[in-house]
Amino acid sequence: MSDSLPDQSPDSTQKHRHATIVDPDAHQVLFDNEHVRVIQARASHGWKNEMHSHLPMLVVNLGTGRQKVTWADGTTQIVDLNPGAVVWQENAFEHAWELLAGEVNVILVEVKSANAAT
């Protein structure tokens, strides 16, 4: 995963439901309180999901894989997932993804107070 994700408009995040609702089989909530929501996202080769939203978050990658990511504006990007990569996503965003190779195994720490600042 790169060091940052493309800047996506926080206003557009209201259009799509959260990842844990759209794709609960791949997005499991591990912890949730008034400050953070911690999600483990896991999927194997060929997995696809619909457009969904995320709050600002820290991403910790545990697996190796390659995704085709489709952003809310329709653009696509190939993202390599590398173990140990840590990425901060400043803004809420929407995306869908398809796993082209390997696995998705990431920990997402969504920061609820960061969303209030956007």
Image (cartoon, helix red, strand yellow):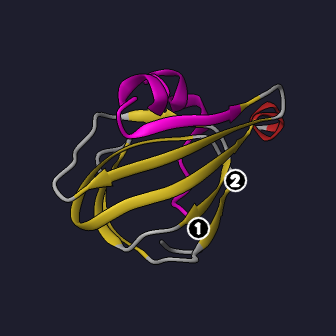
Q: Residue at x 47, y 29 (%)?
A: 20
Q: Quadrant of the C terminus?
A: top right
Residue 48, image quadrant:
top left
Q: Looking at the picture, does residue 101 appear above or below residue 71? A: below
Asked whether, in this view, residue 59 is left or right of residue 32, the answer is left
Q: Looking at the picture, does residue 113 appear above or below residue 44? A: above
Residue 35, image quadrant:
top right
Asked whether, in this view, residue 35 is left or right of residue 28, the answer is right
**Residue type, mark 2 in image:** Glu
Q: Residue 86, how many percent across, how many down?
A: 63, 70
Would you name the residue on which mark 1 appears?
Answer: 4
Element on which disc 1 rests:
loop
Q: Residue at x 27, y 39 (%)?
A: 49
Q: Is residue 104 magenta?
A: no
Q: Earlier in the sequence, mark 1 or mark 2?
A: 1
Would you name the residue on which mark 2 appears?
Answer: 90
Q: Looking at the picture, does residue 108 appear above or below residue 111? A: below
Q: Residue 72, how many percent across, how many down?
A: 38, 41
| Residue lying furthest front | 30
**Residue type, mark 1 in image:** Ser
What is the number of the mark on residue 15? none
Q: Residue 69, how many percent across, how many down?
A: 32, 55
Q: Is residue 10 magenta?
A: yes
Task: Name the one closer to the observer, 105 or 85.
Answer: 105
Q: Residues within 10 Å of mark 2 (few under 14, many from 20)?
A: some
Q: Which segment is the magenta one?
A: 4-31
Element on which disc 2 rests:
loop
Q: Residues within 10 Å of mark 1 (few under 14, many from 20)?
A: few
Q: Residue 67, how many percent across, how many down?
A: 30, 63
Distance CA(mark 1)–CA(mark 2): 9 Å
